[in-house]
Amino acid sequence: MTTSLRKGENVALARGQATFSVGAVGFAVDVSALLLGPQGKVRSDDDLVFYNHPVQDGVGVSGMTVTADLMRIPPGVATVALVASVDPTQPGAVFTTAPRLTVTQPGSEARDFMAPTFTAGETVIVLGELYRRDGGWKVRAVGQGYASGLAGLATDYGVDIDPGPATAPSGAVVVVPVQARSTPSAASVNLTKVEKQAPALLVPARQAGQALVDKGIAGSRAAVYLVLDHDWQMEELYESFAVQSFAERVLALSANLDDDGTVPVIFSSGREPFLEEIRLDNYRGRIGQLHTQVDWGSGDVVHAMRKVVTHYQESGASDPAFAIVQVGDEPWDKSEVRSLLQNTATLGMFWLFVGFGRGKLAFYKNLNASASARFTNVAFYDASKNPGSVPGDRFYNALVDAFGTWMRTQ
């Protein structure tokens, strides 16, 4: 019996060996695996496993199959990315229907995953990720396509591309990994920088830019902040990659508004909010890496909001602040939230509460329900239980709608 996984879903694996089989039709497909350290980059030249280097640290590639001996993968490997690629020189060789990934283990039910249809000329797909969690291993259905081909994969994972010798097998693409390296700095963030550092975010960055154009604030600058609810009811949404996906969309928006390619991230979990950052050069799996360092809380969002205010004031920024606050339930101290919103109205700070999760959100929905007590620097967007299912253009138009109106008054 086989059970299907949806994009973002994960399943725990038993100890021992796991087999990942890739099925594709229509044209030649190369299968490879990338062994990644905790920062999501290859550790050395040997961390790409492919037809020309078929075995490394318990991971092997043979034809359309990747095998992983989970007991032999060394502690320095946090994730194994499972990749399918096509030769872009083949006429019409782009993914429309993704290959099927089937996961099997002796004595366990098989799992398979087929990503949604691709439409942007993708030639490389990360089908899944094998990753460590709580002393064991899980596999997540990813389905991340790259229209920028192997160059996009290279930038995200720290590998270099070589055109390959003339004697390379027909349809093969040669990839040569290199030591992970720092990303060169740039004077300002623009979509060229996104294309170079985070090519998988290029499409959402363009969608976000179009939304800013539609609101009449293209070229405006703002310091973008992201607050994430770390209430225990959000655990499933962290595990399913929904929060990571949401953070990536915010980062793509920030690339159009901010000048450093960095979004401060504050986890709303208690009286000592956890502050870190997500960047164009480290965003892959970043939320999963960070949130495991934070205890589960209970709707204490006001302390995280105060952390945003303090960081913004201490930064000395002259541009307005756009604070995107993801909420999954009602705050436990509503009067404190209202007071903070009132006190920041003159500080050049705009607050957008984005609701998704299982809790009640009536407080945020009704913040501006009273005509006599409206907050001019506050808005709410209900992103549904799964914001990743909202099309990009609609998502960004909702995200910047009220912010754009407010920006034109600044």
Image (cartoon, rainbow, N blue to C red):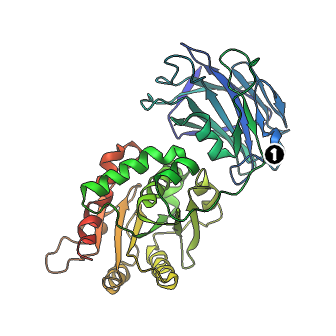
Q: Is residue 226 visible?
A: yes
In the depicted view, which residue is nearer to us: 339 or 286?
286
Query: Badge 1 is on which residue?
Result: 44
Q: Amino acid at mark 1?
A: Ser
In which quadrant of the rendered view does residue 112 lie? top right
Compared with residue 93, is residue 162 higher up or lower down, i.e. above or below? below
In the depicted view, which residue is nearer to us: 71 or 167?
167
In which quadrant of the rendered view does residue 345 lie? bottom left
Q: Is residue 365 visible?
A: no
The residue sitting at 42% across, 51% down in the picture is 205
Q: Residue furthest left?
A: 371
Describe residue 27's horizontal placement relative to residue 316 as left or right.
right
Disc 1 is placed on an element classified as: loop
Compared with residue 207, is residue 28 higher up or lower down, i.e. above or below? above
The residue sitting at 82% across, 39% down in the picture is 46
Q: How many neighbours does mark 1 have within 10 angstroms: few (below 14), some (14-19), or many (20 or more)?
A: some
Describe residue 35's horizontal placement relative to residue 190 as left or right.
right
